Image (cartoon, helix red, strand yellow):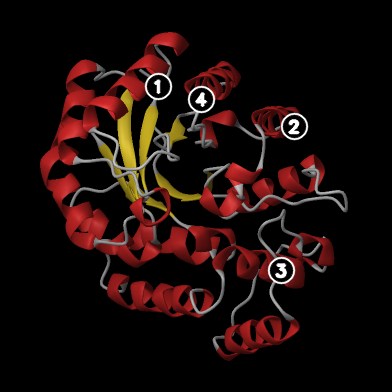
Amino acid sequence: MTERIKGVLSPVVTPFNADYSPDTVRFARQCKWLLANDVGLAVFGTNSEANSISVDERMKLLDGLVEAGVDPKRMMPGTGCSAITDSVRLTAHAVKLGAAGVLMLPPFYYKGVSDEGLFRNYAEIIERVADPRLQIYLYHIPPVSQVPITLKLIERLLKAYPKNVAGIKDSSGDWSNTKAVLDNFAKEGFDVYPGSETFLLAALRNGGVGCISATANVNPAAIANLYKKWQTPEADDLQKQLDAVRSTFAKYPMIPALKQAVAHWSGDAGWAKLRPPLVELTQEQTQGLLNDLEALRFDMPGLKN
């Protein structure tokens, strides 16, 4: 069995051209910068604006990364869509390219759906992809999707598909839920990633395998450093430093703030562009963000082209 992806991963922000088409060249460059800072690639996550990007566009971006020499074993692309057929198509493509795993949202349009319905969704995708290399990481993000991944659903999926259901990203923001998943499943080899570095140290101390975090887009080396040093005496101080940066970005709309930071430190103003319905930070917000980050002596070394 191929060794699973672990550590810190970034839901990589997606660059757009003037006509809102994804920019494969800048995307590959950004991914290589993250990899150089020991951060893996959870492309097409929430902060990638994934649900504003079509299946065809995501497949083209994946192809572009592989063609640019990015190792697919460092990738966990988001492939969960509202339509089973879209999820199957995108997932099969990622597996064919050699991705280490896929991060899979539940179908998120209908609310109040049952565990039975969600089980059927995931089961159908697994059966249709029909590839032993498939490694699914469930994506629990109820603040956005309003469709939770329950402990009972995880248990049922693991029992039915132990070779394909590999782990979960918990973006609930609720440590008690992350802890419950860790306590129930981590010892069974189910890989648990909190959705923020805020919980990275606590998760690692309780059997977690890393984190998949928005701010890994902009603070990759520091987050990866805590992952490496979580068992050292300095770990708690390193966590506090990460929390200060995270809380700064959290004061602003997250995706526009991340892109504005990339635009500023890369010297490429085009990075600030978002695909509607999302919009860029206002001039006042941009200045506030940069002032706040300057006060922390924040930097993104090696990003400038």
Residue type at mark 4? Answer: Ser
Q: CA separation, marks 2 and 1?
A: 23 Å
Q: CA separation, marks 1 and 3?
A: 40 Å
Residue type at mark 2? Answer: Gly
The image shows residue 133, relative to residue 69, as above or below, that is: above
Closer to the observer: label 1 or label 4? 4
Could you tell which of marks 1 and 4 lies nearer the N-terminus? 1
Q: Are marks 2 and 4 in contact (CB under 8 Å)?
A: no
Q: Left of 50 or right of it: where is 191? A: left
Q: Residue at x 24, y 33 (%)?
A: 114
Residue type at mark 3? Answer: Glu
Q: Secondary structure at mark 2?
A: helix
Residue type at mark 1? Answer: Thr
Q: Which residue is mark 2?
A: 64
Q: Quadrant of the N terminus?
A: top left
Give the percent coordinates (x, y) of residue 171: 36, 54
Q: CA separation, marks 3 and 2?
A: 26 Å
> Quadrant of residue 294 in the image?
bottom right
Q: Which residue is mark 3?
A: 280
Q: Which residue is mark 1?
A: 2
Closer to the observer: label 1 or label 3? 3
Q: Residue at x 67, y 57 (%)?
A: 277
Q: Secondary structure at mark 1?
A: loop
Q: Which residue is mark 4?
A: 87
